Image (cartoon, rainbow, N blue to C red):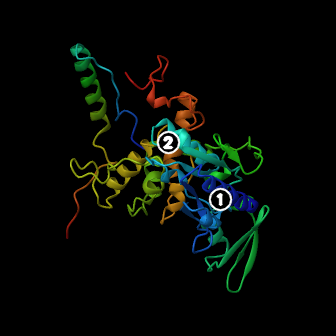
Amino acid sequence: MGIEPGRLHFSWISSAEATKFVEVAREVSAEVKALGPAGYFIKRRAEVA
Amino acid sequence: MLSYAEKIRDAAKRLLEAGTVDVFIGYRKGTVPMMNEPVLVSRPEDADVLHWDSHCGLNLCNYLTKRKDRIGIVANGCNSRNIVTHIIENQISREQLHIVGIPCKGMIDHRAVMRAVSGREILEVTEAGDRFTVRGRDFEETFEKKDYLRSNCAVCTHRNPVIYDEMVADPVEEPADTAPFADVEKVEGMTPEQKQGFFTSLIQRCIRCYACRNACPLCYCPTCFVDESQPQWVGKSSDPTDTMTFHLLRAYHCAGRCTDCGACERVCPMGISMRQFTKKLNKDAWDLFSWEAGLSLDQRPPLDVYRPDDYNDFIK
């Protein structure tokens, strides 16, 4: 539907896998930061004149 | 196709007189041309209003949900698949139903016909075989039905009912060479930016009337997510992001359930092709699970069961 690859991630992490959670969170945030702010599918505040 | 109407009336009369069913659900002629409307008949003498031609575009399965009585219903290919889906989802039981099956050769796209006569007012549409004639105050034109099929009917591969108690005619041949997902493949080939543009312009005209949801037999939740206010899942304005959220969520609720009956597109007052969303999900259901909705009472839908070999490449 037009979301850039890399902005959406799916992961299966058990509550016992703290290390995996940290790894995935770092990875995801780094990848999304690299893409920059999202410009699509963002609801903007209504502009009132 | 017109000969079906007589047989439907006979069947309805017979079933109602014998007390086999309490109510018979079919179509009657609408008040304007090309707009047949659903009708519920409960007295045998009223069965004469029942009608069938190439303008039966709404899905009758909508009227089955949670009914307690015994029901006679006419069903062509897609409608019968929705009946199967309804039974699988426990919205109605098979024992309550007497299904009068109709081999279908597709419905006519009323918008295409209106375009063909340049928007002049159509007063009458009559059918004979594979052709139909459109009449207005000062014009009369005849068209080939196959050139004016609705987009979903043109690529339909399930014209015959998959479930029925009696048939009004012999089954018709199922077309084999349709490319049902050609339009979806085109979108799949786009870059993310092109897709953004495509979907944004697709729903640009949406006025959030929810006619697509109301016409859809899959949408039977007591309270729809768009109507809920605590929590409010989606904004009620016509903000493009809210509108997109509505369309995406509506489509996802139909994943693995949609039979591509085309009722949503038929009823859209703005002529939006929202089948672009549901078709993608139908294609995914086919590619990933070899699944087409509503073909059998014995199989659970793919999103309803777990299999060890389920597709999960997207999860890291």
B315 or B246, which is in the foreground? Answer: B246
The residue that appears at 75% across and 75% down in the rendered structure is B141
Q: Nearer the viewer, mark 2 or mark 1?
A: 1
Q: Position of residue B189 (x, y in %)?
A: 55, 41
Q: Position of residue B33 (x, y in %)?
A: 62, 73
Mark yes or no: residue B259 visible. Answer: no
Looking at the image, which residue is at 67% across and 86% down? Answer: B137
- Counting residues from the start of the chain, the first of labels 2 and 1 encountered is 1
B74 with respect to A10 (left or right): right
Label 2: chain? B
Callout 1 secondary element: helix
Badge 1 amino acid:
Lys
Quadrant that contains the C terminus of chain B: top left
Q: CA distance from mark 2 to mark 1?
A: 25 Å
Q: Is residue B211 visible?
A: yes
Relative to B4, is B298 above or below? above
Which residue is rendered at x = 30% and y = 44% of the image?
A38
Number of residues whose C-alpha sits closer than 10 Å to that of mark 2, classed few (under 14), some (14–19) or many (20 or more): many
**Where residue B173 appears, x then y in whole percent?**
77, 44
State left or right for residue B278 relative to residue B243.
right
Q: Nearer the viewer, residue A19 or B192?
A: A19
Q: How crowded is the residue under tag 1: few (<14 C-alpha within 10 Å), some, or many (20+)?
A: many
Q: Residue beneath label 2, please? A: B86
Indicate the position of residue B99 as horizontal and vertical percent values.
62, 47
Badge 2 and badge 1 in a common chain: yes
Q: In the rendering, which numbered label is found on residue B13? A: 1
Left or right relative to A34: residue B162: right
Chain letter, disc 1 residue: B
Amino acid at the residue labelled 2: His
Q: Quadrant of residue B8?
A: bottom right
Q: Specify the farthest residue to the front.
A: B18
